[in-house]
Each structure stands twice: as C-alpha cells, then as structure tokens.
Image (spheres, helix red, strand yellow):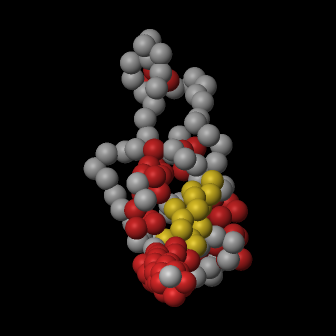
Amino acid sequence: MKRTFHRHMIWVIVGRALTALALIVVLAPHAASQDKRAKVRISNAGFTITALPLLAAKDWNVFSANGLDVELIVMSPSIAAAALAQGDIDYVAGVGPASVAATLTGLPSRAIWFSSDRISYWLLAPPQYKTLESLKGKKIALSGGAGGTNHVA
C-alpha cells in the first residue's frame, strides 16, 4: 500500500510539474511580446480635433497591436523641436512653423503629410454675426494657447 501511495504521489508531482511547464511554454511568448513593444513618445500641440487620429489609435489599441507602446504628450511646438533633437520625444505630430524652422536650421527630420478636403477649424459666433465681415474689428477668442489652433486665426 505504501508503494502505491508513493507512486501516486510521484505521478501527482510529475503531473503538476508538466502542467507548470506547459503554462510557462504557453504564456512565455505572450509575456515576451509585452516586453518587445517599442516605447514611442509623440508630442502634439493639444488634444484637439487634429489629434483625433492619434487618440483613436491609442484608445482602440492600434499601436499596441502593432508592437508599439505609445505615449502621447501635449507639448508646445516651440519646445517640441528641442525635445526631438535631445531625444526626449520620438515624433512631433503636425507640421507647422516651428517644425519647419527647426528643419531649416539643421534638425534632421521628415514629414508625413496628409490632407483633407475640409478645414478642421471652425468659428462659432452669436447669431447676430452672419458673416466674417461682420466680425471685422471685434475681439475673438482662441481655443488653447499652444499649437496649431491659434495660428490659423
């Protein structure tokens, strides 16, 4: 009876060891793939409508599905070029006066451009203002102090 009990215990231990080994083999590639995701830091002037593709891609896990661990950072374009040159960020989302000026002064960079058939800015006004001409000489407010939303106005 002792021998049967010992054999049973040996099979239980072997079975548990094989189960643990199987779990390690099955789960190890998943854990390793989590470590292999490249960390990417992207600056954007603000989380406005122009940042919607980046925000959607992050929220819908498009970056993660492609092996990227993306951090989106709100940063003024005037300091984004310096952060890019120092290696603090990897990409600047958007091409504007600050990024063009940085490139012209020697910062090695490339731009990926996309366009739309509609402008992504709009003007809201009280009902008494029917045309842009009726706003002439009036004070207007801008949404945000950093980035592309204010240099259009």
Q: Is residue 127 visible?
A: yes
- Return the x and y of residue 44 as percentages of the image width and height: 57, 57
Q: Residue at x 59, y 35 (%)?
A: 142
The mark total stands at: 0
Picture coordinates of residue 129, whole percent (x, y): 44, 17
Left or right of 126 on screen, residue 74: right
Q: Residue at x 57, y 23 (%)?
A: 138
Residue 33 higher or lower than 63, as above or below = below
Looking at the image, residue 55 sits to the left or right of residue 39; the answer is left
Q: Name the residue: 45% across, 66% down.
A: 64
Front position in the image: 143 or 130: 143
Identity of the residue drawn at 42% across and 13% down: 127
Residue 78 point in image, percent of width and height: 67, 60
Residue 125 higher or lower than 61, as above or below: above
Front one among 106 and 135: 106
* Percent coordinates x, y for residue 79 in the rendering: 70, 62
From what the image shows, is residue 110 above or below residue 115? below
Outermost residue, top direction? Answer: 128
